[in-house]
């Protein structure tokens, strides 16, 4: 079993215009930089992207927005992106905003074979519009559907040929759920290792969820808010 | 004299109890971490996937893979643990977080909160705010009592799109401390030098002054 | 001559494709692991929480913390991964397992299966069988064609309480190989020395003999 | 923050007759041996136990059954236990059998604050009786409720004072879900370490779910089916 592909270009070769992609990452942390670059290079468009954020003007999904490749963003927070705002206000771009935990849990539902989940977030707000509400034990919940997508694209710290993945620190974020939810899941990793090198007790994403894997190159790992303290 | 942002944070820090798991929102809530009382040990949750958030890193030690929900570089502490975002919001939804501190644009006297959207302005999104307010057992809002136009942010009902309903238990503003119960805002503490009359004048929602109302002690 | 249990397992092993993730039930299905074809690499899932089940341990190397769904001591292989039971059944439910092989007491010609309960007898429980049959895309039943009383286990409908409905795609018995489709059981292979007449006599459910029916090749 | 208690007796001191307990373990693998012994010693009864299995005659939950402490078992498989069978047939013991994945996922639902989940298992069978069935995208699902319990009791490999846990191999099984689902969660561990000794990237159960922890003693870790191969 060998799921390794040569590079990002090969990994995304059958992503077509009009498809729906799920992408891991929170802000610019843990995003699949190499695959995003390859999609930009490939030039497909009319994409629907399910991702917690939409990058910044010149990095992350922002690079796809610059090339007008995105038809619709499904996210919880899309600030810090002037081009996004311009396309949204001009009607070139659609956006569906959903609560962050709902986004994470709808992706998890897909990965667990659950068609929909009952969630608290958004009850009594405009997020609830058009959704079934049900009272369980005195609390109201919204019925939220699992996501359906064509590809999931995630970034991990290390991975092996069989697709087993581990993430580093808060770069884990949405990556495990997106990985589980993909019909076809592409993983780019900082370090590709042989099966057996990752401790079987400490693998975050079992390889069964991952269809293609490659070692990425030239990670920039940009920091959005560099906050530091001074040494005494 | 009204409370400064730091003093609002300081006052909220008095609500912390030993062993609490706490989620602090962006803005004034973040400052609460600077005033954790001596002898009290709390664990800070960052909803992007960390329990045990530590201070900012020393210069040169920033790690792009280690950020908080405000996307700031941070550090860990002994006993910290990372997890994915579904687990993070799962623990929030299951009521495992003891205290949540959030900013707000408006709070209503029934506990409704609005803090994510202003009609006519570019909407950036609710992020995790709707999940937090819907699920947390104990939510304190930290905010200014009035907006820039001098209008009350403690209202009979929110005018902006809601983030959550009937969920806020306490509000700490520059003017005082307000519990929310069936009678509306109950003023239990006032900022040093702030009069009850000023609080009454600047609170649009139903207001009750507690019999034992006292000055905020910081 | 009817197929032995080992030969049933051997025949089922021919269904394996390179890269398959496979869940093997207790009994004959377990034996399939012994006949994985040369050049084919499959990963065995054990629903208690392991992908990449290896062979039994050498004597003296058994580890109580490392067992399969049949509670037998096992080993891992390079690339193995452990996970919790919710994740395990999540991947089953999401259709990530390519092939499931199960035993059965009865299979109906519409794909229903009964394999967990006999009225009047102590019921031990369904374990993971109901989850597996409800969710797997591709389920092969490995069983004897008839019960101890000589009665057909391939029925027009199950008489025992069901484990799952419309879920079985193929049955391999000591007498042959049967696909299940809208016309019922379609006999595509017969065991060496077994006649079509015997198969007809011992199959109570709707039976179609494939035009190109052939002898099982092992 | 220190969640450490002295021993199993102290950990279970406020478990009372009539309560509902969730217990980790699959077969005899990963069961909380020390807590079970302490509950037997304590002598409470009329317990409802949510556990995938019910132990064997003289080990695991079987020890509680011997003392007639269990009123009801909620499990997926209860074979290998003659005393269990005797009590069941005599009407002393109630049993509710539910599919294994449903058991795991109902516990997970509790831990994720979801009141109920839509699951495939059991559609068209007696498991579906009395349950709401709904068709999503052409498939039928049952509405299965989250579990409610008084205590969850789990066994981990290592844990720290803050309640962070890691499990070993397939002894993980149901333990993480049970730990997440407990109103009060008790963890017994083979090795109790200081905060910071467990890698924060590889903790299976974050301490926020664990209320009491102690280092267990004298683990027997009995093997149910000792299967071996011969060396060539």
Image: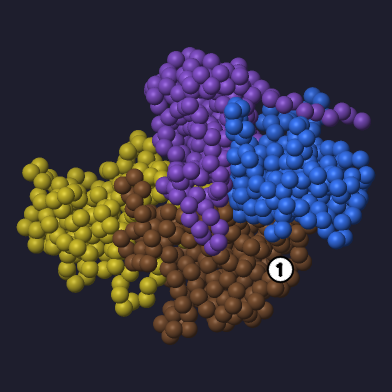
Chain colours: A brown, B yellow, C blue, D purple
User: Could you say where residue C183 lies in the image, as x and y percent from the top left?
Assistant: 72, 58
Res A61 → quadrant: bottom right
- At a point 73% along the width and 41% down the height, the residue shown is C153
Kind of element beneath mark 1: helix
Up the image or down, C34 lies above or below B23; here it is above
Res D228 → quadrant: top right
Return the residue at label 1: A11
- Total tally of numbered discs in the picture: 1
User: Could you say where residue C46 lies in the image, as x and y percent from the top left?
Assistant: 69, 41
Res B3 → quadrant: bottom left
Q: Can residue A212 be seen at all in this image of the molecule?
A: yes
Up the image or down, A131 lies above or below C120; here it is below
- At a point 90% along the width and 55% down the height, the residue shown is C214
Disc 1: host chain: A
State the residue lying farthest toward the bottom. Answer: A90
Q: Is residue C39 left or right of residue D50?
A: right
Q: Can residue C12 be seen at all in this image of the molecule?
A: no
- At a point 48% along the width and 43% down the height, the residue shown is D129
- At a point 51% along the width and 45% down the height, the residue shown is D128
User: Could you say where residue D106 lies in the image, as x and y percent from the top left?
Assistant: 49, 43
Q: Is residue A158 left or right of residue A195?
A: left
Up the image or down, C65 lies above or below A31; here it is above
Callout 1 environment at 10 Å: few (<14), some (14 to 19), or many (20+)? many
């Amino acid at each position: 079993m060998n799921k390794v592909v040569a590079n990002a270009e090969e990994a995304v070769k059958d992503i077509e215009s009009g498809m729906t992609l799920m992408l891991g990452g929170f802000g610019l942390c843990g995003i699949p930089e190499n695959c995003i670059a390859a999609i930009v290079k490939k030039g497909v468009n009319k994409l629907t992207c399910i991702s917690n954020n939409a990058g910044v003007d010149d990095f992350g999904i922002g690079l796809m927005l610059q090339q007008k490749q995105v038809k619709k963003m499904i996210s919880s927070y899309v600030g810090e992106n002037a081009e996004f705002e311009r396309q949204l206000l001009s009607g070139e771009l659609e956006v569906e905003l959903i609560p962050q935990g709902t986004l994470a849990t709808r992706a998890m539902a897909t990965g667990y074979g659950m068609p929909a989940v009952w969630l608290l977030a958004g009850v009594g707000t405009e997020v609830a519009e058009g959704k079934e509400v049900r009272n369980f034990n005195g609390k109201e919940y919204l019925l939220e559907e699992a996501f359906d997508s064509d590809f999931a694209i995630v970034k991990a710290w290390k991975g092996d040929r069989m697709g087993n993945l581990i993430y580093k620190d808060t770069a884990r974020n949405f990556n495990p759920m997106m990985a589980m939810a993909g019909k076809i899941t592409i993983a780019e990793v900082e370090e590709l290792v042989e099966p057996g090198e990752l401790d079987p007790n400490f693998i975050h994403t079992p390889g069964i969820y991952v269809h293609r894997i490659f070692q990425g190159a030239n990670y920039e790992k940009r920091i959005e808010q560099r906050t530091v303290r001074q040494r005494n | 004299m009204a409370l400064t942002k730091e003093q609002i944070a300081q006052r909220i820090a008095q609500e912390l109890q030993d062993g609490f798991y706490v989620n602090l929102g962006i803005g004034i809530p973040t400052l609460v971490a600077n005033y954790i009382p001596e002898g009290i040990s709390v664990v800070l949750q960052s909803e992007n996937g960390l329990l045990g958030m530590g201070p900012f890193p020393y210069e040169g030690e920033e790690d792009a893979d280690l950020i908080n929900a405000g996307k700031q570089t941070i550090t860990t502490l002994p006993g910290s643990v990372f997890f994915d975002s579904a687990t993070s919001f799962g623990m929030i939804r299951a009521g495992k977080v003891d205290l949540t501190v959030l900013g707000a644009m408006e709070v209503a006297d029934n506990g409704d909160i609005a803090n994510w959207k202003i009609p006519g302005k570019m909407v950036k999104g609710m992020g995790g705010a709707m999940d937090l307010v819907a699920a947390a057992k104990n939510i304190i809002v930290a905010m200014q009592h009035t907006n820039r136009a001098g209008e009350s942010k403690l209202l009979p009902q929110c005018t902006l799109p809601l983030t959550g309903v009937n969920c806020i238990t306490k509000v700490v503003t520059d003017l005082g401390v307000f519990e929310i119960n069936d009678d509306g805002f109950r003023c239990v503490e006032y900022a040093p030098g702030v009069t009850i009359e000023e609080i009454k004048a600047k609170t649009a929602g139903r207001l009750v002054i507690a019999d034992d109302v006292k000055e905020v002690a910081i």
